[in-house]
Amino acid sequence: MTKRFIWDFDGTIVDGDFSLEEKLFKDNLSEEDFLRFNEKWPMLLSVYEKEFPRYDRRMLSEFLSTSTGVNISKELIDEWSRYMINVNETIHPGAFEVLDYLQSKGIENVIYSNAFTDTQIGRVKKIGLDSYFKEIIGAEVAVKPNSLGFIAACGSYSPRECVVIGNDYEKDILGAKKAGLDAIYYCPKGLDKKVDIPSVKRLIKIKEMY
């Protein structure tokens, strides 16, 4: 019996407008450093997530500074984390209704996200979804698809009592399955590959499954 739903956040519950990030770096770096850093950092975050087990401000600062030749201080990482609470969010259709439905069935909802916990807590509160979530787990615990993060997101429940829903097949779905959890692949644009696990194009379909 399912006791807990573990939600991915970005791309599953919301789409955020991350153009604010460019402004943050432009305001805090010299023009030369900004140009050098801005062309590399999105790719470097993906590299960091593959090479490091968890998000850590000091480790991320050192990694980005070494990789770009630009001093990205821990203080700037802190500011980055706070700054991103202010991104404009588009909530995916059906999210409120499904969360309300699962909660009414006595199923806990939590978020497990590849981002800093305080950022995601702030974003969830800002869009008025905080009352739906028992807990928000960030990548300080472990970066997806590391099994440790999924196990931590289960809380006091066993993996067999938890279901992961996410839009990233490698990080969310394969990570969950490796940790022994069931998963639902959310693909709002339609399936991009053949999969042997449940998938939904619209979140509202989850109500028919539980």
Image (cartoon, rainbow, N blue to C red):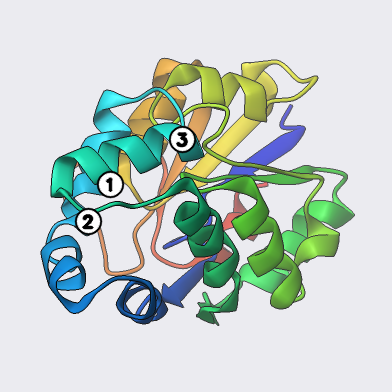
Whole-angstrom CA distance, mark 2 to mark 1, is 6 Å
Q: Is residue 58 visible?
A: yes
Q: Amino acid at mark 3?
A: Arg
Secondary structure at badge 2 equals helix
Where is residue 176 shown, x and y percent of the image?
46, 27
Where is residue 115 shown, x and y percent of the image?
49, 48
Q: Residue at horizontal 48%, vertical 62%? A: 80
Residue named by callout 2: 41
Task: Determine which of the numbered discs, if any, sits on residue 45 in the image.
Answer: 1
Q: Residue at horizontal 38%, vertical 29%? A: 145
Please give left or right for residue 46 compared with residue 15 in the image: left
Where is residue 98 shown, x and y percent of the image?
68, 63
Residue 196 in which image quadrant: top left
Secondary structure at badge 1 equals helix
Nearer the camera: disc 3 or disc 1: 3
Secondary structure at badge 3 equals helix
Mark 2 packing: few (<14 Cα in 10 Å), some, or many (20+)? some
Q: Amino acid at mark 1?
A: Leu
Q: Residue at horizontal 18%, vertical 78%? A: 31
Residue 122 in which image quadrant: bottom right
Labels 2 & 1 near each other (Cβ < 8 A): yes
Task: Determine which of the numbered discs, if any, sits on residue 64 in the image.
Answer: none
Q: Residue at horizontal 75%, vertical 69%? A: 125
Which of the pair 21/125 is nearer the observer?
Answer: 21
Whole-angstrom CA distance, mark 3 to mark 2, is 16 Å
Task: Determine which of the numbered discs, if any, sits on residue 58 in the image.
Answer: 3
Tell me which label, 3 or 1, sits earlier in the chain.
1
